[in-house]
Amino acid sequence: MPEITQLPESDVSKPLPDLDPKTMRKTQPGLKRLFLTFSVLFSFLLGFPFFWNSVEIYRSPLPFREIDSLSTHLRSDTLRFPLHFHALFIGFHSDPDRLRLSLLPQITKLTSQNPKCSYNFTLSVIVDSASACLRSPNTSPPSSLYQCGSITPALFDPKDDEAVDQKLESVFGAKKEYTVVVVKGENERAVVGKYRHAWMLVSAGDQVEMAAVKVAEVLVKVFVNGGREEGSIRNEFMPVGPDGRIVLSFNLLNADPRDWVFDWDFQKIDETLLAPMIEALNPVANITVESQVLYHTPKASFSHWNQKLGSHVFSTNDLPFFVNSNEWHLDTSIAAGGRSKILQFVVYVPSAKECPLLLQLPNGEISKTNGFISPMWGGVIVWNPQSCLKDSESNPVDRRMIPLQDLEEMFEVFIGQFRQLFGFKSINVYTGASGVWNLLPSERGFTEWELDVLSRQHTCFNLHSCATTLGSLSRLVQSLPRMIIKDEIGKQVKFSLEAARLAQSNASNGVYESSAASSRQARSLAEDAFFHPSIMSVSYYSFEHCFAVYSPFFLPVAMHVVLAALRELRRYKKEKAKYLAWKAKAN
């Protein structure tokens, strides 16, 4: 559109030079078109931050440096658990320093060094003779809790090991240290109590050095390793879910309800046998219990009649096919879902045509428990009614209760199977290189020293698993800049790191229960953060994808606006040069 500009009066009074329209113009170029064009361009530029903010993915800040620090610390600095050993020799006349020097290399030799976790042990030795009480001078920490003469050889009555264990607990229980008492006696025997104490009676002719070898073995092989063979069960195969939960599902299966129908008083068993065990394992795992009674549940394997035994028999070769997955609907509640570990324990009541049903071992003997375990699944017990023929002839409509005594015996077997799933032995005997030790059982299913072993083992595994999970989450988040990270994930990562640091501190101070509980919480929070539903969403994408989606809408318009602004700027400069050329010629 042509623009008209008024000439100044001074210019009118002067004679006008010859005008070349291609190179000169008399008037200044207007700024209106330039202003409008650049106004449109600036509106696009000002609106771009608002548009970018509208499509920006929210990311809660994660402590990447702290995550890397945790992983590096666990890799470079092995987690060390303090162990305090105490050896008491009663009735001996030996030098405690010499005994301590003979025990230390034996303990070091038997202690296996785990690349992830290790032990920092101290040893104290006391020789309590009839005339004097000698202590090891280099004892650290000092064992000042023991009063000389408080334990005498007359205490160790072979008929009352419970009383001996209680006496040792009253003397040494105030301090969490593992104690072995060696006493001269007539009847040689060795016992490990249900707390953190063991004792053995040796004959007067035995040398004290031989007793020291047995002391070192029980301290390491039993109190540290739990009486388990090295590598018997790996940490990742422990029956605890990633969220630190275990669901114990107990099932009573009536194979054929046309023959008989049995029920059980599960609530009473839960209160008397299961509740103490669950409370004892609370630092290691959060355990819940469920029960159900099912009908029409035949087994998948076959049995044969043994005329000599007068019963139906199934062998260990049939165990992989015993569990009938098609007919045994071992359902659990909604609370058992997620990443919790579900262990199934089954009481199988055979039908009349297979009763009694017995399990034959490979050596030809009949199993005393008539049950078996399936690693990472649970256990099964076959229960035969007292009189199979008599029960089959009775009225099948009647619902009968399993006798309480039989029920208690079955659940004691279940507790033994549960111990086996944790890697412990179901029998109360430990056979070592230096002899046999009797293990006192606990009414809670697990002794104090066994709970210490589980706490140390789970603390070590949970901390390394937590560090691995958080490290994977950190690398994943940093590799995907457009991933959604909600505040809930940031809080879970933060609390997981705090729980991991607390577990490390408690483990270093020897507070095993608290360290196990904190490490379980750290691992659970790390797993919750990694498997958060928002992370599994498909709403995050790369910057290239974002550009490809929005460029067809905005790129054509933005290109025309930029080109128009450049063209208008170039036109304005050209017209300005024409005016300056005419003005210079006029002057």
Image (cartoon, grey):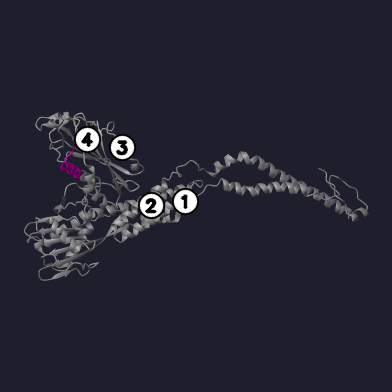
Q: Nearer the viewer, residue 579 or 550?
A: 550
Horizontal placement of 492 versus 344: left or right?
A: right
In the picture of the structure, the residue carrying the numbered disc 3 is: 331
Q: Nearer the viewer, mark 2 or mark 3?
A: 3
| Amino acid residing under circle 1 | Asp
Q: From the image, which quarter does the C terminus lie in?
A: bottom right
In the picture of the structure, the residue carrying the numbered disc 2 is: 467
Q: Is residue 190 visible?
A: yes
In the picture of the structure, the residue carrying the numbered disc 1 is: 487
- Asked whether disc 2 touches disc 3, contact meaning CB atoms under 8 Å apart, the reply is no
- Asked whether disc 1 touches disc 3, contact meaning CB atoms under 8 Å apart, the reply is no
Return the disc, 2 or 3, that comes first in the chain's sequence.
Answer: 3
Q: Nearer the viewer, mark 4 or mark 3?
A: 3
Q: Is residue 204 in the magenta section? A: no
Tell me where the magenta segment starts and ends, as one range. 400-413
Looking at the rendered structure, the secondary structure element under dot 2 is: helix
Horizontal placement of 433 versus 474: left or right?
A: left
Looking at the rendered structure, the secondary structure element under dot 3 is: loop
Horizontal placement of 437 versus 298: left or right?
A: left
Q: Residues within 10 Å of mark 2 (few under 14, many from 20)?
A: many
In the picture of the structure, the residue carrying the numbered disc 4 is: 319
